[in-house]
């Protein structure tokens, strides 16, 4: 009788969590699905179910890893010496882009809103968050495509030319005339090497050609993502001051516009996405808006991309916490399942609370975009976007790092998705203005636009009486604001502290109004206390098991 080799027992794997695949990313995320129903209704949630299934599939997860393992490659010249500036992406990038565009995550929401869809932006925001579970890098061109439309509306003719292509659900890559394409993608070129966020120091020159509204650009752009996109919004110095321009990749006669790709950036994360330095020398551009009003023209694009920074960071948190909760639910140590051990349960519960607060705030902001005509919603967007951009994006690296630690060595190896998420986690704090830029923008909103502060007070006031700790935090935050406003020298120094408190109070107000009691209680007891130091796993009391069960994906 044959017997198995005794060493075969070494190959039996026990006590390892199965891969987290085959679940619906939308319906498995109770915080997300409940927020969608709250702001947009059951029908919109049902619309997102196919996207959630795609995002949680093993195929999507594999494409996400491959797109990062095989980053884009630049070919500046062909074999004969012709300048071509071609950036080649791995097939997995195109797989991800095709589905992101096909699910309407580009500029489709603006078209739907014009057609009377009252919840187009909530649908798109939830879809963007769920789809970003697959791979975050390709979200950059998707986000810029979404954000370009409100800026393009400054000029009805340019909007009519480009918006239908940007709103298309057809991914049609390749450098061709827009007339020859079924869909288009947009990019942006704002920063330069001498200025970064200080775009008013931009040195790229815009020279009028003699044809009304047409210029040539001459200069250097420091970060321009996805240089193979079809159209870019750029800032340059015109005779009348800093102005905004629409720069097509291909000119009407079919020739390529003068966009020389100097190099692709070698980045910490976001490796699937091509971020490029561009040289412009005679690059044809069409002015968007008036000369000298470039920042005002492009500001709506910045607002939309800031929203996507919040959505993307929230998605990173949720993906990381899902992996941590899933691992802890299937792994045992010291004689018990990890989630049955009090300290690990506390850590995962605390991470879940942070993620739920970010989700509530992100979808609330998306709902404000769905109601642009309402004065309260417009004013709330003005102050809450930089607040959320500052706070949620700043919290993300800590959340992802703690989630990685929950997996131990299994989370630190490149076979896990956690290293990819960790490298990505600081990006949204840098993109569209660092923490300081957004904290100072909050101060500008408060000091120059009183309706913005009033909107914040009104919004958090809707939870008044729901939790005494929240009520005290609101009063303390307003007292802090008053003390800072009374001392001009302290105002800017205190901007980060103020922005963080205002953001946390706004999150708390949303959770008190809408989240399950155990979530709101844990948040208010920890985040809104004066002694909170940001350490995860330090919750005191409460139903931690319910928090963990709520955050653990069900496959």
Image (spheres, rainbow, N blue to C red):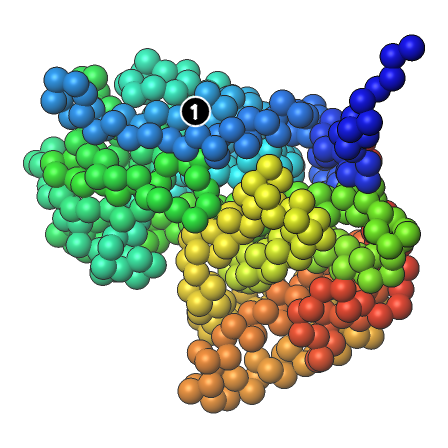
Q: Nearer the viewer, residue 252 or 69?
A: 69
Q: Residues within 10 Å of mark 1 (few under 14, many from 20)?
A: some
Q: Nearer the viewer, residue 372 or 509?
A: 509
Residue 272 appears in the picture as rendered: yes
Q: Residue at x 51, y 28 (%)?
A: 66
Residue 93: where, in percent of width, then height? 47, 26
For mark 1, give the secondary structure.
Answer: loop
Q: Residue at x 46, y 45 (%)?
A: 269
Please state the total of marks drawn on the protein image: 1
Q: Which residue is farthest front?
A: 1
Q: Vertical placement of 522 versus 267: above or below?
A: below
Q: Residue at x 69, y 69 (%)?
A: 535
Q: Residue at x 89, y 68 (%)?
A: 541
Q: Which residue is farthest top?
A: 1
Residue 275: where, in percent of width, then height? 35, 40
Q: Nearer the viewer, residue 513 or 352?
A: 352
What quarter of the picture does the C terminus occupy?
Answer: top right
Residue 454: where, in percent of width, then height? 60, 68
Quarter of the image for residue 553 reads: top right
Quarter of the image for residue 100 reads: top right
Direction from residue 250 to residue 188 in the image, left or right: right
Q: Nearer the viewer, residue 537 or 43?
A: 537
Q: Vertical placement of 474 versus 523: above or below?
A: below
Q: Vertical placement of 224 versus 19: above or below?
A: below
Direction from residue 511 to residue 288 in the image, left or right: left
What quarter of the picture does the N terminus occupy?
Answer: top right
Residue ID for mark 1: 90
């Amino acid at each position: 009788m044959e017997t198995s080799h005794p060493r075969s027992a070494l190959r039996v794997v026990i006590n390892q969590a199965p891969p987290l695949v085959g679940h619906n990313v939308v319906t498995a995320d109770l915080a997300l699905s409940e927020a969608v129903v709250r702001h947009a209704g059951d029908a919109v949630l049902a619309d997102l179910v196919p996207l959630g299934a795609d995002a949680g599939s093993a195929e999507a997860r594999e494409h996400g890893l491959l797109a990062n393992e095989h980053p884009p490659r630049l070919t500046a010249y062909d074999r004969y010496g012709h300048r071509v500036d071609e950036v080649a992406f791995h097939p997995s990038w195109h797989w991800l882009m095709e589905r992101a565009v096909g699910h309407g995550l580009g500029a489709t929401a603006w078209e739907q809103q014009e057609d009377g869809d009252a919840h187009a932006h909530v649908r798109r925001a939830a879809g963007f968050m769920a789809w970003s579970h697959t791979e975050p890098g390709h979200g950059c061109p998707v986000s810029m495509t979404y954000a370009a439309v409100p800026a393009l509306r400054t000029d009805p003719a340019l909007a009519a030319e480009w918006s239908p292509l940007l709103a298309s659900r057809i991914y049609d890559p390749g450098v061709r005339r827009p007339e020859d394409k079924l869909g288009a993608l947009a990019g942006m070129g704002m920063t330069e090497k001498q200025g970064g966020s200080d775009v008013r120091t931009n040195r790229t020159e815009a020279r009028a050609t003699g044809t009304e509204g047409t210029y040539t650009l001459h200069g250097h752009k420091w970060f321009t993502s996805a240089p193979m996109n079809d159209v870019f919004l750029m800032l340059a110095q015109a005779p009348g001051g800093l102005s905004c321009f629409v720069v097509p990749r291909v000119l009407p006669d079919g020739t390529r516009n003068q966009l020389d790709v100097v190099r692709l950036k070698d980045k910490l994360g976001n490796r699937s996405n091509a971020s490029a330095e561009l040289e412009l020398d005679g690059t044809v551009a069409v002015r968007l808006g008036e000369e000298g009003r470039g920042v005002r023209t492009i500001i709506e694009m910045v607002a939309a991309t800031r929203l996507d920074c919040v959505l993307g960071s929230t998605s990173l948190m949720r993906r990381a916490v899902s992996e941590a909760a899933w691992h802890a639910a299937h792994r045992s140590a010291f004689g018990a399942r990890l989630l049955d051990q009090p300290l690990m349960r506390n850590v995962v519960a605390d991470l879940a609370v942070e993620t739920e607060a970010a989700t509530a705030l992100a979808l609330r902001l998306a709902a404000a975009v769905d109601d642009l005509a309402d004065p309260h919603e417009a004013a709330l967007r003005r102050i809450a976007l930089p607040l959320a951009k500052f706070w949620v994006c700043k919290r993300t690296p800590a959340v992802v790092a703690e989630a990685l630690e929950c997996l131990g060595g299994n989370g630190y190896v490149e076979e896990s998705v956690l290293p990819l998420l960790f490298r990505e986690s600081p990006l949204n704090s840098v993109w569209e203005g660092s923490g300081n830029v957004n904290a100072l923008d909050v101060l500008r909103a408060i000091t120059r636009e009183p309706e913005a502060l009033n909107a914040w007070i009104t919004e958090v006031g809707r939870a008044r009486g729901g939790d005494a700790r929240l009520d005290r935090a609101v009063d303390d935050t307003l007292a802090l604001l008053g003390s800072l406003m009374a001392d001009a020298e302290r105002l800017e120094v205190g901007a980060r502290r103020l922005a963080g408190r205002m953001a946390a109070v706004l999150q708390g107000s949303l959770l008190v109004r809408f989240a399950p009691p155990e979530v709101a209680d844990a948040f208010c007891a920890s985040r809104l206390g004066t002694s909170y130091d940001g350490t995860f796993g330090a919750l005191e009391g409460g139903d931690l098991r319910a928090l963990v069960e709520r955050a653990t994906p069900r496959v």
